[in-house]
């Protein structure tokens, strides 16, 4: 953490948040790998191994399995080792994962490589939003919180784009090199002030806050306030983890978060992204499948950029509801297209652009709402004594559902057809919008105390607050 000239407000908070989110860029390449790699491995025989469709689907699925397994241990590490050290630790399994995937001589090496990559994906899904939430001023918390989804989408777009001109081996090498750069960059960033304070490093916490907020901030007063909050928690009667989680405020926050990550996955996002190229190949022979996949990736990035400018203006609830409703419409459009294609292909001869449009609209709206907002809110709604465990449970749920969706996508398509599968996803999106309307509080521009009071209130979330 060096001294930098302070040119713009919140400058160093943006720098630290981007540095942490660079690790998520590397995870984005893990998520984006399967869409371009699948056709090359299965269709062109790239790599040292010959894989059938079922083996490749397991290769895809082992990544979310790793994310689910890592969730609880990562929560324990966040508490004992801190935010920064936890993020740095998971660089190693991510790098080893790419090594195993690149030089795999047996299918088990590919499975293990993806499992290790999943460990890092699950850990970063928890630790990076918490890190950003603890370094950011409440005025920009939503904006810097959206960096997580932005970098994730940018990583996927990078993977889609690179794969057009390289083979799978070269794609793996480039992805591994990007991981190598992350460690040295993030090592220069500070630990969060609240974590330093919890370790008794008050002077260091004040210095860090001054670096983050700028030389004009009253860092000492803010640290004193944070100290009072932490002391109040420490002075409370010791409660078991079970009792801490079962307080009404925590239960309401946990219910909202578990619901959000459930509908995030049941929207079909990972199934769609993992099999994007395959979907376009089924949609039309006239499409340039690789270019269509890149367009979808680009729209994801565009959507997240929109989110970064709107999340602290429009609010979390509105973005989530708008996102879910338009995602529902996108799935309905895709379902109609594939239904007409199945009945009579001549009906859609001049509509090859429609699947690209519908999927682009879907991922854009996902990236505006259900992509970034749940992870932003994870860092906002939980008290510090339960934040790590509650985040672990939300991450475990998300990756377990991601595994289920990635493994059931092909059986769903075989059983319900392409049209029925997308209509099913559309139904979940509609349910997601209703869930947000009823059960998710607004956190935009609110302090932690205000959010906790709102969660404790019996007033319905869709009622206007005075």
Image: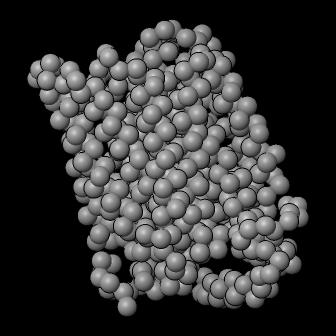
User: In the image, what residue occupies the spot 67% across and 47% down?
Assistant: 22
Q: Nearer the viewer, residue 235 or 355?
A: 355
Q: Position of residue 439 (x, y in %)?
A: 32, 71
Q: Position of residue 227 (x, y in %)?
A: 72, 85
Q: Is residue 327 visible?
A: yes
Q: Nearer the viewer, residue 185 or 85?
A: 185
**Is residue 300 left or right of 72 when viewed as pictured?**
left
**Is residue 348 left or right of 388 when viewed as pictured?**
left
Q: Position of residue 438 (x, y in %)?
A: 28, 71
Q: Image quadrant for the C terminus?
A: bottom left
**Is residue 145 left or right of 420 when viewed as pictured?**
right
User: In the image, what residue occupies the spot 29% across and 64% down?
Assistant: 435
Q: Quadrant of residue 92?
A: top right
Going by the picture, which residue comes out furthest to the left? 343
Q: Image quadrant for the N terminus?
A: bottom right
Q: Nearer the viewer, residue 307 or 411?
A: 307
Q: Is residue 58 visible?
A: no
Q: In the image, is residue 243 above or below residue 99? A: below
Q: In the image, is residue 311 above or below residue 166? A: below
């Amino acid at each position: 953490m060096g001294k930098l000239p302070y040119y713009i407000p919140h400058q160093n908070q943006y720098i630290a948040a981007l540095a942490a989110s660079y690790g998520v860029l590397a995870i984005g390449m893990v998520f984006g790998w399967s869409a371009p790699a699948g056709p090359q491995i299965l269709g062109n025989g790239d790599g040292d191994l010959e894989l059938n469709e079922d083996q490749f689907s397991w290769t895809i699925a082992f990544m979310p399995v790793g994310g689910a397994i890592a969730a609880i241990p990562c929560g324990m590490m966040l508490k004992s080792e801190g935010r920064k050290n936890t993020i740095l630790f998971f660089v190693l399994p991510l790098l080893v994962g790419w090594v195993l995937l690149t030089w795999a001589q047996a299918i088990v090496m590919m499975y293990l490589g993806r499992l290790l990559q999943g460990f890092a994906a699950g850990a970063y899904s928890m630790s990076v939003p918490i890190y950003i939430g603890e370094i950011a001023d409440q005025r920009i918390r939503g904006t810097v919180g959206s960096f997580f989804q932005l970098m994730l989408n940018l990583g996927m777009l990078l993977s889609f784009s690179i794969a057009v001109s390289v083979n799978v081996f070269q794609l793996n090498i480039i992805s591994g090199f990007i991981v190598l750069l992350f460690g040295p960059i993030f090592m220069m960033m500070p630990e969060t002030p609240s974590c330093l304070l919890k370790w008794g490093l008050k002077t260091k916490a004040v210095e860090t806050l001054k670096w983050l907020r700028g030389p004009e901030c009253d860092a000492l007063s803010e640290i004193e306030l944070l100290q009072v909050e932490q002391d109040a928690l420490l002075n409370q009667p010791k409660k078991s983890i079970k009792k801490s989680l079962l307080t009404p405020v925590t239960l309401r926050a946990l219910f909202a978060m578990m619901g959000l990550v459930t509908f995030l996955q049941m929207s079909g996002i990972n199934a769609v992204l993992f099999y994007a190229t395959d979907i376009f190949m089924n949609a039309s022979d006239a499409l340039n499948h690789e270019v269509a996949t890149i367009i979808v990736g680009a729209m994801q990035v565009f959507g997240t950029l929109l989110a970064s400018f709107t999340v602290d203006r429009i609010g979390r609830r509105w973005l989530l509801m708008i996102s879910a409703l338009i995602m529902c419409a996108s799935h309905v459009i895709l379902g109609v297209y594939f239904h007409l294609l199945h009945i009579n292909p001549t009906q859609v001869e001049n509509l090859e652009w429609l699947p690209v449009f519908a999927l682009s609209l879907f991922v854009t709206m996902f990236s505006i709402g259900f992509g970034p907002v749940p992870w932003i809110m994870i860092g906002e709604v939980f008290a510090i004594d339960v934040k790590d465990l509650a985040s672990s449970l939300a991450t475990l749920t998300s990756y377990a559902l991601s595994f289920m969706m990635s493994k059931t996508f092909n059986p769903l398509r075989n059983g319900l057809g392409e049209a029925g599968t997308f209509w099913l996803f559309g139904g979940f999106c509609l349910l997601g919008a209703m869930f947000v309307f009823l059960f998710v509080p607004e956190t935009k521009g609110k302090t932690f105390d205000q959010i906790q009071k709102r969660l404790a209130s019996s007033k319905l979330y869709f009622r206007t607050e005075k």
